[in-house]
Amino acid sequence: MAEIKNSKEAEGLVAQGKDAYGKNDYAKAVELFRKAADMENADAMYYLATCYYYGKGVPKDEEKCVEWYKKAAKLGHEGAQDALKNRGIKW
């Protein structure tokens, strides 16, 4: 039951993060994505990677970007898998 609660909580954090990102509040978005990523949410990991890629709310960092894409890819996130494939990186 705790896993379901964490899943729903993580999904809520991701939704809030996407909303903050859409309002250009990148620091808040990163904070929310990181919390959800810590709950093993692949979408949050993907969005966090994207923040590192563009330098939104965090310093631009390709290494951290790839690290988060790999974590999301290992959980089956297709967008992260494609992002790594486009970089010639195996996960």
Image (cartoon, rainbow, N blue to C red):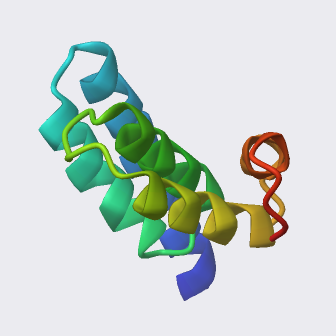
Tally the marks: 0
Res. 39 in view: yes
Q: Is residue 80 above or below residue 6?
A: above
Q: Position of residue 79 (x, y in %)?
A: 76, 40
Q: Is residue 26 above or below residue 38?
A: above
Q: Position of residue 33 (x, y in %)?
A: 37, 52
Q: Position of residue 56 (x, y in %)?
A: 26, 33
The structure residue drawn at horizontal position 57% and vertical position 59%, both measured from the top left corner, is: 66
Which of the 4 image quarters holds residue 51? top left
Q: Is residue 41 above or below residue 86?
A: below
The structure residue drawn at horizontal position 46% and vertical position 62%, both measured from the top left corner, is: 63
Relative horizontal placement of residue 66, taking residue 51 as reference (left or right): right
Which of the 4 image quarters holds residue 19? top left
Which residue is outermost to the front?
88
Q: Position of residue 59 (x, y in %)?
A: 20, 46
In front of the other: 91 or 24 = 91
In front of the other: 43 or 57 = 57
Res. 75 in view: no
The structure residue drawn at horizontal position 15% and vertical position 26%, both measured from the top left corner, is: 25
Relative horizontal placement of residue 69, taking residue 81 as reference (left or right): left
Image quadrant occupied by the N terminus = bottom right
Image quadrant occupied by the C terminus = bottom right
